Image (spheres, rainbow, N blue to C red):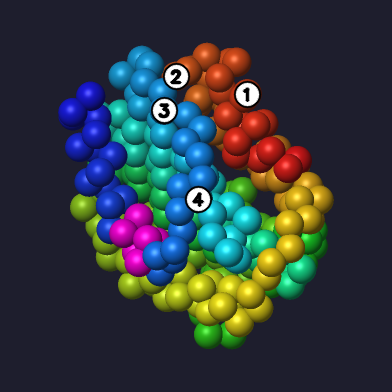
Amino acid sequence: MTKLMQTSNSLWREYKNLLSETFPDLEVDSEWANWEENNTSLSAKIYVNNHILKSREVEIWDEKSCIYNNIIYPRTGSNLPCFGMDLMGFFDKKVIIVFDFQHPVENYLFSHPDLPKAKGTFRFFEPGNHFSENVYVAKCTMSEVNEHLDMFKKYLTVYRDMLECEKPTETDFSVYCDFDSYMKKLDPVSGFLSNKFGKEKSESLVNDFLFCYG
């Protein structure tokens, strides 16, 4: 367990620290899962604050890989996007970093003028279909992950400013039904989880935690 924890804590530590620094009032609402099977560990938690309906975080790691996924769902009433991050370290030479403003309304092309626009096309991440024109996608090695921290901080700061400006307070879960349904179909994690933790646990995590509004 110690070795597995070291893998988890080392790869995305600075990203998680930035998230905590940007939203210092986020508090743990619940610990949904804490699994360890087949030399793989999984942690799933939900965080909340006054303007965030939930920040649902899942981290999966073993001796070679670490995947960190988090979607921040703002409280409703202000037409704000979610903020999603997929930080995927599969092995030393294969790391994919994605973060973006993910709007819950289908076919809504969100764009922020102070951030770079995505260039090219990316599998799974289609601007205008819950992803924005600013979707940030980078491929690197594990030793290079922190080279993208400054941009991650810039995106997080912009998102924090959105929340502080609008101060959303409503809790209309139906706003996120289409979004979660779309993401559930898109996300490839189910098969990976099934191999590690079994079909029943995998389906429960996807349906009851990751995309429970869909």
User: Which segment did they paint magenta?
Assistant: 16-21
Q: 103 or 29, which lies in front?
A: 29
- Horizontal arrangement in the rendering, residue 201 relative to residue 174 (left or right): left
Residue 193 vertical placement versus 169 (above, below): above
Q: Of helix, strand and loop, which one carries label 2?
A: helix
- Asked if marks 3 and 4 touch (Cβ < 8 Å), the reply is no
Q: Of helix, strand and loop, which one carries label 3?
A: strand
Q: Mark 4 highlights which residue?
A: 47
Query: To which quarter of the image does residue 78 belong?
Result: bottom right
Q: 49 or 158, which lies in front?
A: 49
Residue 175 vertical placement versus 119 (above, below): above
The disc label shown at residue 203, or none: 1
Residue 128 vertical placement versus 90 (above, below): below
> Mark 3 vs mark 4: which is more N-terminal?
3
Q: State the CA–CA distance, disc 2 to disc 3.
A: 14 Å
In the rendered view of the protein, which quadrant contains the N terminus?
top left
